[in-house]
Image (cartoon, rainbow, N blue to C red):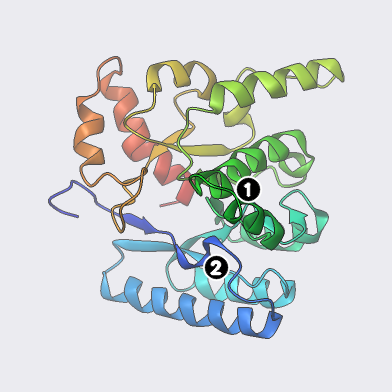
Amino acid sequence: MDELGIDIQVLHNTMWIEQVSERPDVEAALCRSWNRWLADTWRQSHGRLRWSCVVPSMLLDEAVAQVKTAKQNGAVAVCLRPLEEARHLADPYFYPLYETAANLDMAIAVHIANGNRDYCDLYRSSPGSPVPMFRFPTVAACFTHLMSEVPQLFPKLRWGFIEASAAWIPWIYREVEIRYRSTGRKFSQDLFGEHNVFVTCQTNDDIPHILNYSGEHSLVIGTDYGHTDSASEVDAITEFNKLEGLSPAVKERILCHNPKTLYAL
């Protein structure tokens, strides 16, 4: 982290990228175990490794209890999948979880994933890359969130859409604008900022163009250097600072101020 210029790293999981069990009690035990492990990691890191907790979505009371414990042990976000079995994240079923996160000043981190078994099985049965199985639902979850009543019901709750690039932001922005105006809803040009939505960008995104839609307060960056895939870039911080077309102030906001706001660091 010192070599890469990272002061604080927020850790997200990969194991929960799909449903880990069909049994609620097993899922709860696995989440509790994972969260305890990350709590130990946080203590050993002297506060430099923060994390997003995983929750048993089939047992919401247990999920709320685990979030409260996680907050006391270094967690800064609640990690959810874009789809949790048959439920999307705008489902009122999740409202008690959102209320808890908002009261604890924790973000909701929607990491690329898919908790719907039928959806995953469909992509596995088809040739090609598995990327759509995880990234498309993440983009759809952001769109659903912006169209839903959730931002109005939980105005202080911050949302991060993690590891799905940011190239889709202009499309989502225009889609929401069209649908807001067609139904008479007030549309703000600061769509993402007004709804407390943050999106992780990559160094190969056209960030100057994306900023026209996201605004400079809604982008953060990640390295994903724990494993190798299209979003992993060990030197992301260094490469980001080399990008042309961005002022030093905007770069500092994306690298420092925005993640501090998203995760209340």
Residue in the foreground of this view, choosing between 152 and 203 = 203
Nearest to the observer: residue 241 or residue 70: 241
> Which circle, 1 or 2, is nearer the viewer?
2
Q: Which mark, residue 54?
A: 2
Calculate the distance from the C-alpha at mark 1 to the C-alpha at mark 2.
17 Å
Q: Is residue 143 visible?
A: yes
Where is residue 13? Give x, y as percent.
Answer: 44, 63
Q: Observer-nearest residue: 21 or 55?
A: 21
Q: Amino acid at mark 1?
A: Leu
Residue 126 picture location, percent across and down: 59, 49
Q: Could you tell me residue 225's position as x and y percent?
A: 28, 53
First in sequence, mark 1 or 2: give its number.
2
Location of residue 134 with respect to 58 vertically, above or below: above
Q: Amino acid at mark 2?
A: Val
Q: Could you tell me which residue is drawn at 64 percent across and 35 percent down?
A: 195
Q: Quadrant of residue 140?
A: top right
Quadrant housing residue 49: bottom left
Please say if the residues under marks 1 and 2 sit with CB atoms less than 8 Å apart.
Answer: no
Q: Is residue 211 above or below residue 35?
A: above
Q: Residues within 10 Å of mark 2 (few under 14, many from 20)?
A: many
Q: Which mark is residue 157?
A: 1
Label at residue 184 = none
Q: Name the residue at 33% across, 74% down.
A: 41
Does residue 259 appear to the left or right of 121 in the view shown? left
